[in-house]
Image (cartoon, helix red, strand yellow):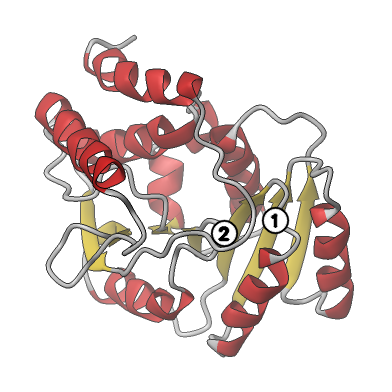
Protein backbone atom coordinates (compact mmCIF):
# COMPACT_ATOMS: atom_id res chain seq x y z
CA UNK A 1 0.00 0.00 0.00
CA UNK A 2 1.87 3.07 -1.21
CA UNK A 3 1.60 6.63 0.04
CA UNK A 4 -1.02 7.43 -2.59
CA UNK A 5 -3.58 4.95 -1.38
CA UNK A 6 -7.22 5.63 -2.17
CA UNK A 7 -8.91 6.14 1.22
CA UNK A 8 -12.70 6.33 1.28
CA UNK A 9 -14.53 7.52 4.40
CA UNK A 10 -18.03 6.01 4.28
CA UNK A 11 -20.54 8.08 6.27
CA UNK A 12 -24.21 7.01 6.46
CA UNK A 13 -26.56 9.95 7.04
CA UNK A 14 -30.15 10.43 8.12
CA UNK A 15 -31.11 13.98 9.09
CA UNK A 16 -27.55 15.28 9.57
CA UNK A 17 -27.66 18.50 7.54
CA UNK A 18 -26.00 20.60 10.30
CA UNK A 19 -23.21 18.10 10.96
CA UNK A 20 -22.30 16.95 7.46
CA UNK A 21 -20.60 20.16 6.22
CA UNK A 22 -18.64 20.36 9.50
CA UNK A 23 -17.45 16.76 9.09
CA UNK A 24 -16.53 17.35 5.44
CA UNK A 25 -14.45 20.36 6.55
CA UNK A 26 -12.66 18.37 9.26
CA UNK A 27 -11.78 15.62 6.77
CA UNK A 28 -10.57 18.16 4.21
CA UNK A 29 -8.40 19.88 6.87
CA UNK A 30 -6.49 16.62 7.40
CA UNK A 31 -4.85 17.21 3.98
CA UNK A 32 -4.46 13.47 3.47
CA UNK A 33 -3.60 12.61 -0.15
CA UNK A 34 -6.15 10.21 -1.64
CA UNK A 35 -8.79 10.82 1.04
CA UNK A 36 -12.39 10.89 -0.20
CA UNK A 37 -15.75 11.17 1.55
CA UNK A 38 -18.66 8.97 0.45
CA UNK A 39 -21.99 10.08 1.93
CA UNK A 40 -24.68 7.39 2.01
CA UNK A 41 -27.93 9.25 2.55
CA UNK A 42 -31.11 7.37 3.44
CA UNK A 43 -33.53 9.84 1.88
CA UNK A 44 -33.28 12.29 4.81
CA UNK A 45 -36.43 14.42 5.19
CA UNK A 46 -34.30 17.37 6.38
CA UNK A 47 -32.48 17.66 3.03
CA UNK A 48 -29.13 16.14 4.08
CA UNK A 49 -28.96 14.54 0.61
CA UNK A 50 -29.14 17.98 -1.03
CA UNK A 51 -26.37 19.26 1.26
CA UNK A 52 -24.27 16.22 0.26
CA UNK A 53 -24.91 16.93 -3.44
CA UNK A 54 -23.75 20.55 -2.95
CA UNK A 55 -20.54 19.35 -1.27
CA UNK A 56 -19.96 16.89 -4.13
CA UNK A 57 -20.56 19.63 -6.70
CA UNK A 58 -18.02 21.88 -4.99
CA UNK A 59 -15.37 19.10 -4.67
CA UNK A 60 -16.24 16.30 -7.10
CA UNK A 61 -12.84 14.64 -6.67
CA UNK A 62 -13.18 14.56 -2.87
CA UNK A 63 -16.88 13.92 -2.18
CA UNK A 64 -19.27 11.29 -3.55
CA UNK A 65 -22.92 10.69 -2.71
CA UNK A 66 -24.97 7.51 -2.71
CA UNK A 67 -28.71 8.16 -2.40
CA UNK A 68 -30.79 5.31 -0.99
CA UNK A 69 -34.58 5.40 -1.06
CA UNK A 70 -35.15 2.70 1.56
CA UNK A 71 -34.40 3.44 5.20
CA UNK A 72 -33.56 -0.09 6.36
CA UNK A 73 -30.85 0.53 8.90
CA UNK A 74 -27.24 1.49 9.46
CA UNK A 75 -25.91 -1.93 8.48
CA UNK A 76 -27.51 -1.83 5.04
CA UNK A 77 -26.29 1.74 4.47
CA UNK A 78 -22.74 0.70 5.37
CA UNK A 79 -22.87 -2.38 3.12
CA UNK A 80 -24.02 -0.21 0.19
CA UNK A 81 -21.32 2.41 0.82
CA UNK A 82 -18.49 -0.05 1.46
CA UNK A 83 -19.42 -2.10 -1.62
CA UNK A 84 -19.30 1.02 -3.78
CA UNK A 85 -15.97 2.11 -2.24
CA UNK A 86 -14.45 -1.31 -3.02
CA UNK A 87 -15.91 -1.30 -6.56
CA UNK A 88 -14.26 2.10 -7.11
CA UNK A 89 -10.85 0.81 -6.08
CA UNK A 90 -10.48 1.88 -2.44
CA UNK A 91 -7.34 0.60 -0.68
CA UNK A 92 -8.62 1.65 2.75
CA UNK A 93 -12.25 2.12 3.82
CA UNK A 94 -13.12 4.07 6.96
CA UNK A 95 -16.46 3.73 8.76
CA UNK A 96 -17.48 6.92 10.53
CA UNK A 97 -20.62 8.46 12.02
CA UNK A 98 -21.93 11.78 10.72
CA UNK A 99 -22.77 13.11 14.19
CA UNK A 100 -19.22 14.34 15.01
CA UNK A 101 -18.86 11.80 17.83
CA UNK A 102 -15.78 10.31 16.10
CA UNK A 103 -12.63 12.52 16.04
CA UNK A 104 -11.40 12.95 12.46
CA UNK A 105 -7.98 13.88 13.89
CA UNK A 106 -7.33 10.19 14.72
CA UNK A 107 -7.71 9.03 11.08
CA UNK A 108 -4.00 9.54 10.18
CA UNK A 109 -3.00 7.35 13.17
CA UNK A 110 -5.46 4.63 12.12
CA UNK A 111 -4.12 4.65 8.57
CA UNK A 112 -0.54 4.57 9.87
CA UNK A 113 -1.32 1.45 11.95
CA UNK A 114 -2.81 -0.27 8.88
CA UNK A 115 0.28 0.61 6.85
CA UNK A 116 2.90 -0.43 9.40
CA UNK A 117 1.37 -3.51 11.08
CA UNK A 118 -0.40 -6.71 10.06
CA UNK A 119 -3.75 -5.43 11.39
CA UNK A 120 -6.66 -5.98 9.00
CA UNK A 121 -8.76 -3.34 10.75
CA UNK A 122 -8.14 -0.57 13.30
CA UNK A 123 -10.88 0.38 15.76
CA UNK A 124 -11.10 3.87 17.23
CA UNK A 125 -11.59 2.64 20.77
CA UNK A 126 -13.12 4.23 23.87
CA UNK A 127 -11.92 1.47 26.17
CA UNK A 128 -8.18 1.14 25.60
CA UNK A 129 -5.78 3.24 27.74
CA UNK A 130 -6.04 6.87 26.61
CA UNK A 131 -9.57 6.43 25.23
CA UNK A 132 -12.72 7.87 26.81
CA UNK A 133 -16.48 8.06 26.35
CA UNK A 134 -18.35 11.37 26.22
CA UNK A 135 -18.28 13.35 29.48
CA UNK A 136 -22.02 14.00 28.99
CA UNK A 137 -22.84 10.30 29.15
CA UNK A 138 -24.84 9.43 32.26
CA UNK A 139 -23.85 6.41 34.35
CA UNK A 140 -26.59 4.30 32.69
CA UNK A 141 -25.19 4.93 29.18
CA UNK A 142 -21.70 4.07 30.41
CA UNK A 143 -22.96 0.96 32.17
CA UNK A 144 -24.95 -0.21 29.12
CA UNK A 145 -21.96 0.31 26.83
CA UNK A 146 -19.54 -1.45 29.19
CA UNK A 147 -22.01 -4.32 29.68
CA UNK A 148 -22.57 -4.68 25.90
CA UNK A 149 -18.82 -5.03 25.36
CA UNK A 150 -18.39 -7.52 28.20
CA UNK A 151 -21.40 -9.51 26.95
CA UNK A 152 -20.25 -9.69 23.34
CA UNK A 153 -16.69 -10.62 24.31
CA UNK A 154 -17.82 -13.23 26.83
CA UNK A 155 -19.84 -15.03 24.15
CA UNK A 156 -17.69 -14.51 21.06
CA UNK A 157 -14.16 -14.27 22.54
CA UNK A 158 -13.19 -11.37 20.29
CA UNK A 159 -10.51 -10.02 22.67
CA UNK A 160 -11.45 -6.52 21.59
CA UNK A 161 -11.95 -3.79 24.20
CA UNK A 162 -14.51 -1.80 22.16
CA UNK A 163 -16.43 -4.44 20.22
CA UNK A 164 -19.45 -2.23 19.47
CA UNK A 165 -17.46 0.76 18.18
CA UNK A 166 -18.48 2.31 14.85
CA UNK A 167 -15.26 4.17 14.00
CA UNK A 168 -13.00 1.83 12.03
CA UNK A 169 -10.36 1.79 9.30
CA UNK A 170 -10.28 -1.33 7.13
CA UNK A 171 -7.84 -2.70 4.60
CA UNK A 172 -9.83 -3.36 1.44
CA UNK A 173 -8.64 -6.99 1.38
CA UNK A 174 -10.04 -7.59 4.87
CA UNK A 175 -13.46 -6.37 3.75
CA UNK A 176 -13.34 -8.70 0.75
CA UNK A 177 -12.25 -11.66 2.87
CA UNK A 178 -15.11 -11.22 5.36
CA UNK A 179 -17.59 -10.78 2.48
CA UNK A 180 -19.24 -7.58 3.71
CA UNK A 181 -22.03 -7.81 1.14
CA UNK A 182 -23.47 -10.90 2.87
CA UNK A 183 -23.74 -9.32 6.35
CA UNK A 184 -27.40 -8.99 7.26
CA UNK A 185 -27.35 -7.40 10.72
CA UNK A 186 -27.97 -3.77 11.69
CA UNK A 187 -27.08 -1.27 14.39
CA UNK A 188 -24.37 -2.29 16.85
CA UNK A 189 -24.81 -5.90 15.74
CA UNK A 190 -23.38 -4.94 12.37
CA UNK A 191 -20.13 -3.78 14.01
CA UNK A 192 -19.96 -6.94 16.12
CA UNK A 193 -20.62 -9.25 13.18
CA UNK A 194 -17.86 -7.59 11.14
CA UNK A 195 -15.43 -8.04 14.04
CA UNK A 196 -16.49 -11.66 14.50
CA UNK A 197 -15.91 -12.49 10.84
CA UNK A 198 -12.51 -10.80 10.98
CA UNK A 199 -11.43 -12.85 14.01
CA UNK A 200 -12.82 -16.08 12.52
CA UNK A 201 -10.70 -15.46 9.42
CA UNK A 202 -7.62 -15.26 11.62
CA UNK A 203 -7.12 -11.57 10.85
CA UNK A 204 -5.85 -9.09 13.40
CA UNK A 205 -7.92 -6.30 14.97
CA UNK A 206 -5.95 -3.33 16.34
CA UNK A 207 -7.36 -0.60 18.61
CA UNK A 208 -6.24 2.98 19.03
CA UNK A 209 -7.63 5.36 21.69
CA UNK A 210 -10.23 8.01 20.87
CA UNK A 211 -12.22 10.48 22.89
CA UNK A 212 -15.82 9.78 21.92
CA UNK A 213 -17.98 12.94 21.90
CA UNK A 214 -21.72 13.22 22.44
CA UNK A 215 -23.59 14.38 19.32
CA UNK A 216 -24.35 18.11 19.41
CA UNK A 217 -26.98 18.38 16.66
CA UNK A 218 -29.80 16.03 15.66
CA UNK A 219 -31.21 12.99 17.43
CA UNK A 220 -29.74 9.63 18.40
CA UNK A 221 -31.30 6.74 16.46
CA UNK A 222 -31.04 3.80 18.91
CA UNK A 223 -34.38 1.97 18.99
CA UNK A 224 -35.55 -0.89 21.20
CA UNK A 225 -35.62 -3.15 18.13
CA UNK A 226 -31.94 -2.42 17.49
CA UNK A 227 -31.09 -3.08 21.16
CA UNK A 228 -32.87 -6.46 21.08
CA UNK A 229 -31.18 -7.43 17.83
CA UNK A 230 -27.84 -6.48 19.39
CA UNK A 231 -28.49 -8.74 22.38
CA UNK A 232 -29.37 -11.76 20.20
CA UNK A 233 -26.69 -11.30 17.56
CA UNK A 234 -23.72 -12.88 19.43
CA UNK A 235 -25.70 -16.08 20.00
CA UNK A 236 -26.79 -16.24 16.35
CA UNK A 237 -23.17 -15.85 15.27
CA UNK A 238 -21.95 -18.45 17.75
CA UNK A 239 -24.48 -21.04 16.65
CA UNK A 240 -24.29 -20.20 12.96
CA UNK A 241 -27.79 -18.65 12.94
The quadrant of the image that shows the N terminus is bottom left
Residue 20 pos. (x, y %): 69, 65
Asked whether 7 or 193 is in front, the reply is 193
Q: Quadrant of residue 45?
A: top right
Secondary structure found at label 1:
loop
Judging by the rendered image, the residue that carries numbered circle 1 is 16
Mark found first going from the N terminus, 1 or 2: 1
Asked whether 141 or 145 is in front, the reply is 141
Asked whether 6 or 23 is in front, the reply is 23
- Compared across the picture, whether 114 is left or right of 43 comes to left
What is the C-alpha distance between the residues marked 1 and 2?
Answer: 7 Å
Secondary structure found at label 2:
loop
- Compared across the picture, whether 59 is left or right of 32 comes to right
Q: Residue at x 34, y 9 (%)?
A: 241
Q: Quadrant of residue 7?
A: bottom right
Q: Residue at x 81, y 41 (%)?
A: 43
- With respect to residue 237, does 129 lie above or below? below
Task: State yes or no: discs 1 and 2 in contact (Cβ < 8 Å).
Answer: yes
Does the rendering let one see residue 72? Answer: yes
Judging by the rendered image, the residue that carries numbered circle 2 is 99
Q: Quadrant of residue 197?
A: top left
Residue 95 pos. (x, y %): 49, 55
- With respect to residue 25, does 46 lie above or below? above
Amino acid sequence: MGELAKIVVVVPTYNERENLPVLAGLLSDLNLPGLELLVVDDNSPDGTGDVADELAKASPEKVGVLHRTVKDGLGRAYVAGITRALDEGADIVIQMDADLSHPASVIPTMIDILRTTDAGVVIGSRYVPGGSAAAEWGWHRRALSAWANFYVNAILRLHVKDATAGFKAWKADTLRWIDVASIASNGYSFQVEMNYRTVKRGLKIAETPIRFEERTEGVSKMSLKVQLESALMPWKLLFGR
